[in-house]
Amino acid sequence: MKKIITAAGLAAVCASGVQAQSSVTVYGIIDAGYVGGNSRVVSPTTGAETKTTVSQFGQNAESSSRIGLKGIEDLGGGSSAFFTTEFQIYPQDANLGGNVNNGLFNRQSFVGLKKNGIGQAALGLQYTPIFNAGLATDPGNFNNLTGNVIYASAQGIAGASAGTSYIGFTARTANTLSFKTDSVAGFTASGIYTLNNKNETQTTSGATITGGNTNASGWGLGVDYTYNKFYAAVAYQALKQFTTADTASVPSTSNSHEWTNAQANGASTAPTLPGGNALNVQDNQFYAGTTYDFGILKAYAQYLNRKATSTISSGYYLGRSAEQIGLRSYITPAIEAWASAGLGRYTYMGSGSPTANFNGWQAGSNYWLSKRTNLYAIYGQTTVSNSTTSTGKTVSAGLNNYAIGMRHTF
């Protein structure tokens, strides 16, 4: 249940005066249950197959557990100020300081202004246009089990057990200015500009270079359209990081990093630019998705393309594309089900130019006990085939993931 803290409630903890039009909402999700999975991966060097099985009472299968605060203040004349701060939590961890999950994870933190009839702008750590467009057009609502080729993820069993890959797009950026327009004739536009540049005097001591430029910037745009039961969204984002103090003239896994974030990784044997904080990379990403509500069910179609190129050498890059279709429907007023299937391909331009084809599918169901509480069951599977390594060998891998749990929103 959402908790509204009015001005009277805040008076005890706020030294400054708060207008009667102000409010703060405490919200969140707790998701826990049984999580299991199996993976297999064939070694590209020995040909030996390694199998892993996981069975545990886990967490965050359907939704990432979180707690947040969001507030709004009416400034008059159709204007308002707003903020959101949201942190991911792990119900099975012994302390909020973090065990293996490193404690509270900052999902969103921003402040902004809104004008009715025009739109809004905000500053802080925020979701990207592709994340917002994808969430609105994904049949599985971006749950955290494997099988979704657009939002590659896994729970309980590590994605690295079936090779290593990173999510198909950047979900959030810090140091970001965003905007979103109000709807005009069914169209809504949004965008981001992220900027985090640092320039220092560059010094050289032997083979060591320090200082110089450490620049991270980028932009993204999104447009969506609604007409009766039809919805479509398109988004593009281009993110760049360049560090001049780099002694290596050849790109490698230590000096060229994808622009990614702390989302769960998927499963694939395709070699990739390593994930983590962006380093020496131009990361271009495109997404298109659509839905149509037939009444008895809603149909989904999605396409995603990403190319992350080293700024040290344009011949070193990772390409990933995927397409997916799905359905979601209420079978009864209390039982909801969905299914999706998709395929894609990795292209890695480096030593030996490795490639990989992959496919995945997922099915799940919710049983709603109330508007805020549901039981769920989800199964997903991802398979990688015809994957070639830098030595020219062909390998394969597979991962399945399943969960039965309970989710409560408040």
Image (cartoon, rainbow, N blue to C red):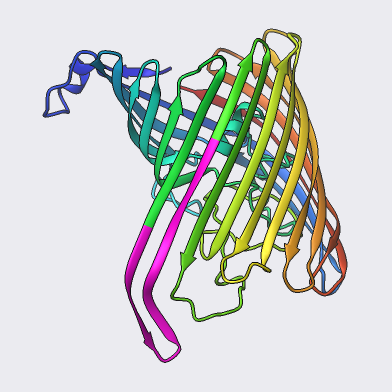
Q: Note whether residue 249 is visible.
A: yes
| Residue 220 falls within the magenta-colored stretch | yes
- Front one among 369 and 362: 362
Residue at 51%, 35% in the rendered image: 65
Identify whether 131 is placed above or below 116: below
Q: Is residue 86 left or right of residue 152?
A: left
Quadrant holding the N terminus = top left
Q: x, y percentage for residue 374?
A: 60, 20
Q: Is residue 328 left or right of residue 22?
A: right
Q: Main secondary structure of the magenta part?
A: strand
Quadrant holding the C terminus = top left
> Image quarter for residue 348?
bottom right
Q: Note whether residue 132 is visible.
A: no
Identify whether 395 is placed above or below 192: below
- Front one among 55 and 375: 375
> Image quarter for residue 234?
top right
**Magenta-colored span:** 197-221
Residue at 57%, 58% in the rendered image: 282
